Amino acid sequence: MDPLSMIAMASTTFKGIQTLVNQGAEIERVAQKLGSWYSYAADIKQAESEASSPGAFRRLFQSQSVEQQALDSLVASRKLAEMEKQVRELIVWTYGVEAYQEMIMLRRKIKKQREEAIYRRRKRKQRILDGMIIIFAIGIGVGIIVGMLKAVGAM
């Protein structure tokens, strides 16, 4: 999904947050919308990082020009930065600085836990792949030895 369509979804969610806060909604309802918005924000940031270092397949079949991709990324990141600033202001004005700081601390903690889980998964996948390669190499080695023994025995 391109950054501009993701920013459109984030903008819609952001407007929902503004509406809830302006109506004096409970923090739980606002938190649900904030969670959705932060998910979109993370997706946008991830798409930008993937766009800056695309794989070979993606480079060959990229439908956008480099300039268009850069412009889309710039627009999305600027819009996202502005929304982040407004989200901070909404939370601080409505729930206080302490609530915002607590949310940031919890966000960092959760992000660290998720990253650690992702790294563990990557390591496990790498170990499985390494194991499969070793088993394949052993199988080929055994096949060559058996083939040579059969060839020697046939003489």
Image (tube, grey):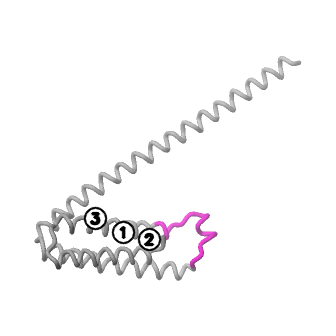
- Give how far apart the Cα atoms at labels 2 and 1 are: 12 Å
Which SS class for mark 3? helix
| Residue highlighted by disc 1 | 40
- Give how far apart the Cα atoms at labels 3 and 2 are: 20 Å
- Earlier-in-chain disc, 3 versus 2: 3
What residue is drawn where x is 22% and y is 65%? 31
Nearest to the observer: residue 42 or residue 136: 42
Q: Position of residue 155 (x, y in %)?
A: 89, 18
Is 54 part of what is drawn in magenta?
Answer: yes
- Earlier-in-chain disc, 2 versus 1: 1
Residue contact between numbered discs 1 and 3, judged by CB atoms under 8 Å: no
Which quarter of the figure has residue 45?
bottom left
- Amino acid identity at mark 1: Tyr
| Residue highlighted by disc 3 | 35
Q: Would residue 120 be found to the left or right of residue 59 on screen?
A: left
Q: Position of residue 105 (x, y in %)?
A: 20, 60
Q: Position of residue 80 (x, y in %)?
A: 34, 76
- Amino acid identity at mark 3: Gly
